[in-house]
Every structure is written in C-alpha cells, then in structure tokens.
Image (cartoon, rainbow, N blue to C red):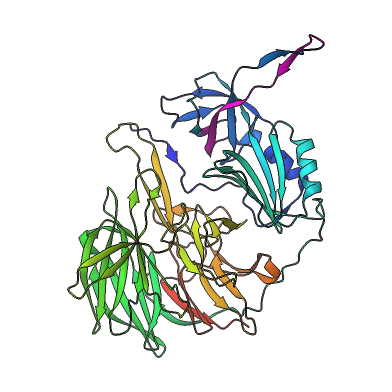
Amino acid sequence: MRLSLVLFLAFTSTQILAQSVGLNQIVRDLGEKTGTVIRSSDNGGNLLIDIGGQQAIEAGDIFTGSSASDTVIHPTTGEKIRVSPKAMTIVGVTQVEKDYSYATLISGPPPAAGDKIVRLGGVPAYFIDPAKEAGPLFIKLRERVPHIQWLGYLSGADAKVPENFVGLVVRLDGEQMTVDYTPGWPVKAYTLDNSNVSTSRSRLNSPAPEFPYPEPVLSLSRATIAADMTTVDGQLLIASSTGENVQIHVRNGENAEQLAEMPIPNRNRLLAMRWWQPGAGQPVMLALTMWDGKSAEGALLKWDNNRLTTIKANLPFIMGTFDLDGNGSREELLGQPFERNGFFGQPIYRLAVDAAGELETAPLSYPTPDKFTVTGSLIADFTGDGKNEFIDIRDRKLTIYSATGEKIFRSASKVGTGVTRLSYDLYPSQQFSPLVEVMIEAPPTLMKLSGSEQNSLVFTTIAGAGIFFGNASTRSSPLSILGFPGNQFIESTVYTFEGSVLSTLNDAGRLYFLTSYLHSKTSLKAGTEIMVTTPR
C-alpha cells in the first residue's frame, strides 16, 4: 500500500474567519504550546508531531526547535544568568488530526524524533501598523505573548520590516489583522472586534451595498467544471466544459444556443479557461490551462466564424488574460511556467500570436510580485491611485499587491469555490512521495457601483467546511464585495448562491454570474445557470 503526505500548498488556516475576534482569541492562537517530534525525515518534508486539534493546533501554526540554552557570567556581580535559547529550526503545520499533526520544514536543520518543539518559541517578530492606531494592542500582545521575540512596533504608511527579515510579521490594516511567517508562510488572519481589542479608533461599520439578487436569464443542461464569459460585438459569449469537451454558447433571446464543441486538446484534464481579445481585427481566442498527468500546459483555441479550432497546443505555460487599460477587453495574454514545488513558477512572460500563427514570447515590461499567479487574478487600478495593482486568489485568500509588489491587503474570509483541485506527486520517482495540492480559482471582477466613482471587487467566498467529490464541491457561494472608501479596505457579504460561481462578467454595469450545480445534494437545481443583476 502506498503512503503519501499531502503538502497543502493551498492550505488554509481555520482561523481565517469572517466573524470578528477579540484579543483573548488572538492570544490563545499565538500562545505557547509544546510538543515532540514523533517522526522525522532527512529533508524535513514528512514530519509528525504529537500535538493536534485536541490541543487547539491548526494548519499554518509555526513551531520552533531551539538551540541549547546558554549561561553568561555577569561581569560585576559574577552571577550566572541563563540566556534563553534561540529558534534554530522552523516547521509549519500542514494538516491537523485529533492527537497529532503533520508538519514540514521551513528553515534550519530537520528536527530528529524526540526533539521538543514550541509554538512560535523565540521567533523574531515585528508589528506593522500603517494607521498608527494599534500601539495599545501591540503592548498587550507583547505582555501576554512573551515567548515571541518582539523586535519592535513599526507605524506609518511606509512602515515595513527590514530588508531580508526572516520571522513573524503581524500587520493591522483597518480591521484586518494578518500574521505571516515571512517569507511565504501565512499563519493567521482575523477581522478584529474593536469592542474587545484596544486601538485608538472606533470600529468601522461596513454595510453591504445595494445589490439585488440576480435573475436567471439562461441555462445549460449540464453542470460545468470550468467556464468563462465575455461579450463580442454586444453578444454574450460563454465558454464552458464538463470535463471532456469545450462548448461555446451564445445568448439567443431567452435561450443559450450552442455553436461549437470540440475535445480538450490531447484529452488533458482542464484546469482553467479564459477569453483573450488580442485587438481590433483579430479573432477572439480561448486560452486553456490543462494538466497532462505530469505537468501543466496551455493551449490556444481560435474562435472565428462560429468555429473553434486549435492553433497552439502543448504550450509550457499556465495561461491568464488581463484587461490592463480598463476598457473591458482582455487584451493581455500572460504565460507562467509550471514549477513542481509550488505549481506557479517564475518568470511570467507576455505571449502573442504573429501573422503566421506562431507564438511569440517576450519579457514583461512591468514587474510582478513573486507570489503572483496568472490564474484567478486581475491586473487593474483598484485603489484609484492611477497605478495597476496585482490581485489574485491563491491559497483560498484574495491578496492585493501594489504596483511595486508590496502586499497591501489579504482577505480574512476564505475565498473561491474549491471546484478545481489538483494533487500530484512532488517526487514522482519516489515510492513515498509527498503530494502537492493546488486549487485553481476564477478571478474576481472589478466594477463601479452605480453612483460611485470608486471601484469594487466582486468575488465569492467559501461557506462552511464543504465536502469534495473529486473535482467538484457541494459548497454554496456567498457573494462578497470589497471596497476602498476613505483609503480603508471594507469587505461585505451580500447574499449566498446555492451552487458554485465559476465565472463573473461586468458588462457595462450589468453583472453576470455563471453558477454550476455540481453534485449538489441540497439543491433541486441541476446543470448550469447564468444570472444577471445591476448593482445600485
């Protein structure tokens, strides 16, 4: 029997919640917990520790193994003073069971079986407060969580940790607090209840905008696993797939008329599809991202004269399309290489097709954040500062990076649908290989609400724990809106869809949703439904 460890590269801490929390909850989550390594490995990738859910351990928690304590002699009194040990080994919890947890090595030498480990023991940390309002909160955390090595409180709009800092970063933006082990390991995220957390400002209220529940306008007979919508010459164009073929439908009055269908290239597993509109006079294309059983690859399909044809397959890229100039047309095609450890590799390239139908690749003329993904993402001026931000959904979080690559927002709620979920062996030639798991999500949608000059982001979040059926989920889809009034990120939930929202489209202020009812045991609906609303 084959044994495998799942490395949750798309893991989500169960503390990334929509409800508000107070100081006591944060202190409990960051509090000192001691455990023992009960299984080790040479590369640190398959660890077991004897502490789990019963001890309030959660995925994302950081544990440290320390150097031996030291003793120094006071030069005046001759007194022996014990110096606390320093964190040498850092491991992160990837999966939690009742009485034990799986963990993976983040830095330092792999711990041996029998080694003691402490949650956040001796980890260096900074508290970042751009609004200069959370000094009282920092003081309380420093007092109540003393086993963390607090290096300082940094405040102001330009506050950031020193270059090449490795350690814990606690950041408060408005009501959103994030706790990350940098680089690259999210630990916790909270929405703060300011009636229980001392800051120097009152709690923000975030009423939901007026967002009428959408009316159904079209339906497809089969449930889809991937889809995308666009408009061409004023006509709604729908690309969808049930897993084997790609279908193209258009809206014809109250009916969805199927115009074309073709097999997925090479019979690969489809992960994502995005419409691409290269420019005036050029045919619309469909960019596919697929899995061939060993790696991710892309394909380009041309839509012309109601026919769908493959112009390029076996492309070594994960594919994404973007509307950089904000005119409603996705004119930019980007390709991201597959990287086995984290799925999304670097660097990202700009792709184009020349007059002879050959693919051209070129370096980007603008920098992208290291963690940016071309799936589930936007490049757009959301904040209104005249510069495009990078917005993506990865690891079940919506993250916004500034034009210079600085992370300026991460959602407190779990984001996405979990419909497209891929697992593969990290080391295919090894008998006991860890599994890498990644989720591919649809991007959020940018729009201006009626009567407002400010942009809003529309996206779906995850309700409850959900149950997965292979490539599908029974989750409902709460609809969330993120605004940026008064330079504050405000997130609101407006209502919940029964199925999984796989695509949204802003068509001149009208918002279309494509919802698939995949393996739903709670809904009487079946197939796929397209709905529309006009927010006010």
Residue at 58% over, 40% down = 165
Identify whether 330 is placed above or below 468.
Answer: below
| Furthest-left residue in this view | 356
On the question of residue 224 being in view, the answer is no
Q: Quadrant of residue 195?
A: bottom right
Choose between 442 and 171: the one closer to the eye: 171
Q: Quadrant of residue 265?
A: bottom left
Identify whether 487 is placed above or below 198.
Answer: below
User: Residue 471 in magenta?
Assistant: no
The picture places residue 308, in percent across and down from the top left corner, at 24, 76
Choose between 444 and 217: the one closer to the eye: 444
The picture places residue 248, in percent across and down from the top left corner, at 31, 77
The picture places residue 255, in percent across and down from the top left corner, at 38, 86
Choose between 317 and 269: the one closer to the eye: 317
Q: Main secondary structure of the magenta part?
A: strand
Choose between 107 and 115: the one closer to the eye: 107
Identify the magenta region. Answer: 77-102
| Furthest-bottom residue in this view | 253
* 266 left or right, relative to 338: left
* 301 left or right, relative to 65: left
| Furthest-front residue in this view | 76
Identify whether 226 is placed above or below 529.
Answer: above
- Quadrant location of the C terminus? bottom right
* 192 left or right, relative to 395: right
